[in-house]
Image: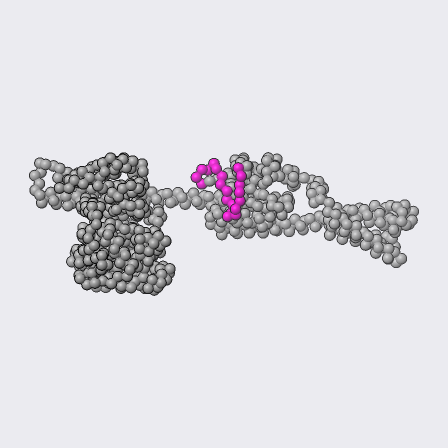
Amino acid sequence: MNSSKVLVVDDEDSIRRFLRVALASQTYTVFEAALGQEALSCVVEHKPDLVILDLGLPDIDGVEVTRLLREWTQIPIIILSVRGSESDKIAALDAGADDYLTKPFSVGELLARLRAALRRAAQTSSGPIFTINGLKVDLARRLVTIEDHEVQLTPNEYELLRLFVIHAGKVLTHRYLLREVWGAEYGDEFHMLHVNISNLRRKIEREPARPQFIITEPGVGYRLRIN
Amino acid sequence: MVSQEPRPSSNPLLIRQVRKLLRQGFNWRYYLLGLGFVLLATLLGYLVREFLAPTNIIMIYLLCVTVSAIFCGLGPSILVSILSVLAFDVFFVPPYLTFAVEDTQYIFTFIVLLLVGMTISYLTSRVRQQTEAARRREQELAALYALGQDLAIASDLQSYTVSIIQRIKETLGHDVIIFLPDIQSKAKLKVYNGGVDVSVDSNEFTAAARSFQNKKIIGHGTDTLASAGAKYLPLVTTRGAVGVMAVKKTDTASELTIEQERLLEAYADLAAVAIEGIQLADELRSAQILKATEKLQTALLNAISHDLRTPLVSVIGALSSLQEEGMGLNDTAKESLIQVAREEAERLNHLITNLLDESRLEAGAMRLSRQPSEIHDLVGSTLEQLGSRASTRSIKMDIPAEMPFISVDFGLIVQALVNVLDNALKYSPPDSPIEIKGRQVAQEVHIEIADRGIGIPEQDLPYIFDKFYRIKRPDNVTGTGLGLSISRGVVEAHGGRIEAENRVDGGTIIRVILPVGERLNHMEKLNE
């Protein structure tokens, strides 16, 4: 029913093995690479629809692989990393990776992220209206409603929400959001970002301390939850 | 050149005196002063010659010799004695203004005058020298005492070397570099410069190493390596050489006298004993630390090998049952085995995460990447991390909308809160509520997590944040005794603290207290 091609890049044989079984059972076609160099040539050769990339590769660093791929392709990349290497994760996301998972992860979680990334990549231009759990964002009319009540947002809050909506489900790093909304010179003004996110949550979340829409990725950034 | 000579104490007195005279050099001022005294005596004698017999005028000359001996030293006063005899002859013994003598008995007067003058010169200068020597000894003793005092206060090698270097600089005016064997490789010497910037070239290292190996004074002013810029004194104790002291003359300082050389050697002895003392103490301490570490590691291994293996037993057991086809398991049984394997594997993951965090905290390797963080966000992410375990429980939140941002490592503080909340969930009945409260108290943020569990025995309260501490509980709650200890480590790394107390109406409150950075307060205002 689906025949998307997925490239799994990890130097651990056992991890590749269980991913192969899990993905094949979902009718994905699986390619494997144990090294960064192999991964790069495999992408050229087989043109997969998505790459699952381990950061700790023996030859080329996963962040570097991401950068090299992004020089010529927008193929979705999901990063696998171990806990505690937040800076590597951020580097990979800033280099253009779409999402990340911390090892160990459940296959259910991986499949959900994988489907979301494939869906985002397939969407050429979705309609101007985004709806989830009572939150409706009309990008054409710049109108945000929650349970049909209009929400007044400041221009920066709206801009943040717009970025979340067009990248729904994708992790957006602090630095990316700051650069997109305020400009490159504000890349380190984390406090400004956090204050605006906090205000935005108070306006759209039912319970700001247990957000349903804008999810914090500790130490990395935020993402808009889509399911 | 001085110390090339044999030790002064082994020399006859006279040779020492002559040497001393030579060493002091010809101090023209004293000789001129002596000459002046003779002139003055002659003038005085000339004025009173009408009233005094020539034999009495001799007294004026003797006075003159005595005064010279006191003020000018041995050499000048000998000259004064001779000049006095000549002047007396020329001016007061007829025929005047010639060296000729009419009355031959004056020859006897001359000889006696000369001998008495010489004797006075000699005796006076002896007294003078002894006084001076006593004064110098007193100074030496005071200097050594002062160094001894410094060393008694100093507690580490660094402050020891600083005091030694400063004392020598103060009393002798010479620069000192101390070389001590490297802690790692005993064969190599390391420079201790007392915090002063000095450059030490390889020649100096070689010289120091040579002095260290041979336990001999070498370098400037000795037979060995006389051309070196500094003098190298080995710091020797009964156990052997502990280091080397290089003493270098500064531009302003003069060459060391014999007494100063002796003082320097006394300094070296004192320094050697002191440095040996601290080295021995260091060795003892590291041996003790090693022993304590080994003991801790054994305890740790015992504790965790059990905790690590237990989940694996269930995982392997469950998976092998599933593989065993002959067992004829129905779907429900299979499902429950898979559930067990999954839960136990996750427990193992949690345990390993905690162990890694703990070891990173202990090694001081936890680097905080601080970011302004919101309390709501921290608590929300904590609940998010706990997933279904938190969402299936009734959790009451009481955090004011307006809370200051705190500058913390978001991920680590969330981890600390997860551990606290995890404990609260584990040790309270599933249908009881958990309360999370946030408050700002002065320049601090308090986050309280309160449960309605059975509480903590009063005597256990002070220890619950200690590593591997687990309260004896009747129920079958598993844990490693690491969670709260990690929470405390993380909170303290942020300059905060963590407290536990029992609630009067049952249950426990854990309070995480974190400081509000001043800069963030300021920014808060700017943003509003």
Q: Position of residue B272 (x, y in %)?
A: 52, 43
> Is B411 or B163 nearer to us in this picture?
B411
> Is B118 or B297 nearer to us in this picture?
B297
Among the 4 quarters of the image, the one containing residue B390: bottom left
> Is B438 or B213 nearer to us in this picture?
B438
For the point 79% across and 48% down, the residue is B80
**A214 up-or-down from B226: above or below:** below
The secondary structure making up most of the magenta span is loop
Q: Position of residue B206 (x, y in %)?
A: 53, 36
Q: How many marks?
A: 0
B184 inside magenta stretch: yes
Q: Is residue B76 left or right of residue B362?
A: right
Q: Is residue A101 left or right of residue B162?
A: left
Q: Quadrant of the N terminus of chain A?
A: top left
Among the 4 quarters of the image, the one containing residue B425: bottom left
For the point 26% across and 50% down, the residue is A171
For the point 77% across and 46% down, the residue is B78
Q: Position of residue B236 (x, y in %)?
A: 53, 40
The magenta segment is B183-202
Q: Position of residue A57 (x, y in %)?
A: 29, 38
Q: What colouring method underlies this structural image?
A: one colour
For the point 19% across and 37% down, the residue is A30
The answer to whether one can see residue A186 in this image is: yes
A146 inside magenta stretch: no
> Is A216 or B321 nearer to us in this picture?
A216
The answer to whether one can see residue B457 in this image is: no
